[in-house]
Amino acid sequence: MDKQWKLYEDLDSILYTREQLAEAVAKLGERITRDYQGKKPVMVCILKGASVFFCDLIRQIDLPVEIDFMVVSSYGSGTATTGEVNIKKDLGRPVNGRDVIIVEDIVDSGVTLSSLKKWMDSKGVASLRICSLLDKPARRRVPLSVDYSCFEIPDAFVVGYGLDYAERYRNLPDIGVLSPRIYEK
Ligand code: IMP
Ligand code: MG
């Protein structure tokens, strides 16, 4: 069985199995389908972490969605966010007048997304919602509410299902807590 993969040796525990993830993503897709009836939302995947979640989620949404991709990083660090966001890969098409859903892997301090939210608002979107697979509210440094999320998690460093540590573990089909011995090395 897959959990015999060598990569699993670096985890302390499995937090969500692929089955739990699939069930939660399907429920979220149904919810978004209901909430956006009659609309054609643009779903924006924040690369690279949200990629696996995004591909599963859009296939659970029965609406004429459009998809787009961004690569962003925040200039802000610590408690003071500058409200500026470094766009490393911009949207392919304008989003003014559109209903936009930003899809992220995890909201931690909230710095990245609160900056991106301001940027997106300045583009004249009709509406904007944040969808994040995981939410770590205990770590929030700037106020940011997540409109859609699958799981609230405790303050632990997790990997898998797109989430990385130093670009590794994104390909794990489950989400697990990375053993501190990996990053304390
Ligand atoms: P923040 O909300 O601006 O602090 O940034 C969130 C980003 O930090 C996410 O998009 C992830 O790339 C990364 N991140 C935060 N916590 C974790 C974690 O537990 N595992 C993997 N990446 C994380
Ligand atoms: Mg990331």
Image (cartoon, rainbow, N blue to C red):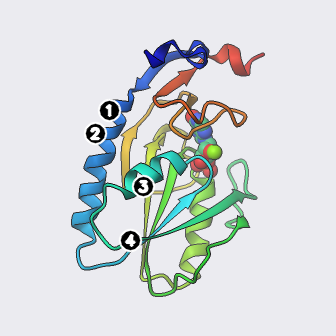
State the residue lying farthest toward the front: 1
Which residue was labeled with disc 4? 65
- Between the C-alphas of marks 4 and 3, the distance is 20 Å
Asked if disc 3 and disc 1 are in contact, CB closer than 8 Å, the reply is: no
Q: What amino acid type should be assigned to the residue bearing mark 2?
A: Glu
Q: Earlier in the sequence, mark 3 or mark 2?
A: 2
Query: Cα distance, mark 3 to mark 1?
Result: 20 Å
Contact flag, marks 2 and 1 (Cβ < 8 Å): yes
Q: Is residue 78 left or right of residue 9?
A: right
Q: Secondary structure at mark 2?
A: helix
Lower sequence index among marks 2 and 4: 2
Q: Which mark is residue 23?
A: 2
> Callout 1: 10 Å neighbours few (<14), some, many (20+)?
some
Circle 4: residue type: Val
- Residue kind at label 1, given as amino acid type: Gln
x, y (%) of residue 182?
70, 18
User: Which of pointers 4 and 3 lies earlier in the amino acid sequence?
Assistant: 4
Residue 20, numbered label:
1
Q: Is residue 92 above or below residue 143?
A: below
Tag 3: residue type?
Val
Distance CA(mark 2)–CA(mark 4)? 21 Å
Residue at the image point whose x is 78% and y is 16% from the top: 185
Q: Nearer the viewer, residue 77 or 156?
A: 156
Spatial CA span between label 4 and label 1? 25 Å
Give the structural element (helix, strand or loop) at label 3. Answer: loop
Q: What residue would you read off at disc 3? A: 146
Height in image: 142 above or below 126? above
Q: Position of residue 68 (x, y in %)?
A: 54, 68
